[in-house]
Amino acid sequence: MILHPSILALFISSLLISLMTLYACGYGILILLRWDISSGSELQITLERRTYLISTIVSYFLVFQLVSLFLFIQTADSICHLFVGAMCAVGTLTANPFGYPTLALKTLTFLAAGGWLILNHADSRGYDYPLIRPKYLLLLCMAPLVLAETVLQAVYFLRLKPDIITSCCGALFSQASRGIAAEIAALPAAPMQTAFCCSLALVTASGVYFCARGRGAPLFAVASTVNFPLTLAAMISFISLYIYEMPSHHCPFCILQKEYGYVGYPLYALLLTSAVTGIGVGVLHPFRNRESLKQFLPKMQKSLAVVSILSILSFACIVIYQILSTSFRLDGY
């Protein structure tokens, strides 16, 4: 294992988040089985008091869960110099088989945690805890992901050894290589540009339609969900090429480094924000007719939609700037 302050911080935070999630799930099961807002029993009063405290604490922990994704990536990037052959986070993540599964799980729990925070905020605005059961059901569904992430992350860091010879991003994202990364890098630029622009247009149009008419929330949520992996693929396929000004450098992690102005951090933050808030519009949609939320929920959904649209358009603006500010052009463009 490599001793590093960020690794220790990730260890401790993941353990605390897992323990808190398990503790909250215990009350969640009790709430799903015994919650009755019309009851004045001692159990009901106890649940009402504790759920407020637990929800508040879980909210703080899940906010750090969001931050931990970026901390994990930054840590992987900052210790890459310890491995022979590594030039960025790619080398660190391929140092053992648990790197990319951990990153995938952290991304998935990021989206789930964002959805839970949105659901919890809406629930806190209702006088009768209208979303108490849905939010604890979601937390119960999240628990296995959080626990699996904690275990995988621990195994990954414990098995990191500085004497390991690993791969550089040029080898992993080479079109001549094998694997999912290489297949995405080999995707033709023209179709990917078309797909990216169409996805961006669909998210924007469906979001604007929802804000204007108050309808189409499921479509907007689905468009935001699909746009997330498609845009990640576009980052590898062609967007990164304009940032690096190299026709063969497809790495999605080098853009996090100083040489490229750390442009990757705002890009990924905007993309994740757009996905979470867009999905959040859909998550809240089934509850729009709850009596205690009728006045608040439509406004919250529209606010989330606006944030999602502005985030993905800001992402697009940064990408367009990167493309127009360089003389590099792909063949045929």
Image (cartoon, helix red, strand yellow):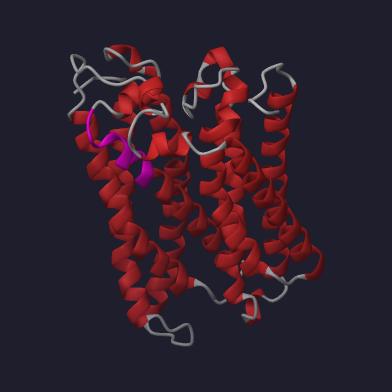
In the image, is residue 8 above or below residue 32? Answer: above
Where in the figure is residue 47, as x and y percent of width and height?
A: 39, 72
Please indicate whether residue 84 sits to the left or right of residue 308 in the image: left
The answer to which quarter of the image holds residue 65 is top left
Taking the spot 82% from the left edge, 65% from the top edge, the residue there is 212
Locate the C terminus and report the quarter of the image it occupies. Answer: top right
Q: Nearer the viewer, residue 17 or 110?
A: 110
Taking the spot 32% from the left edge, 64% from the top edge, the residue there is 25
Q: Is residue 127 visible?
A: no
Residue 97 colored in magenta in the image: yes
Where in the figure is residue 165, as x and y percent of width and height?
A: 22, 17
Please indicate whether residue 187 sits to the left or right of residue 219 in the image: left
Please indicate whether residue 267 sits to the left or right of residue 254 in the image: right
Please indicate whether residue 279 sits to the left or right of residue 215 in the image: left
List the single residue furthest toward the front. Answer: 332
The answer to which quarter of the image holds residue 127 is bottom right
Taking the spot 27% from the left edge, 44% from the top edge, the residue there is 150
Query: What is the magenta range?
Result: 96-105
Q: Nearer the viewer, residue 113 or 192?
A: 192
- Main SS of the magenta part reads helix
Q: Is residue 171 visible?
A: yes
In the image, is residue 84 above or below residue 253? Answer: above
Q: Nearer the viewer, residue 219 or 329?
A: 329
Taking the spot 57% from the left edge, 21% from the top edge, the residue there is 262
Residue 317 colored in magenta in the image: no
Where in the figure is residue 102, as x and y percent of width and height?
A: 31, 40
Q: Nearer the viewer, residue 140 or 97?
A: 97
Locate the N terminus and report the quarter of the image it occupies. Answer: top left
In the image, is residue 293 above or below residue 179? Answer: below
Where in the figure is residue 115, as x and y percent of width and height?
A: 51, 58
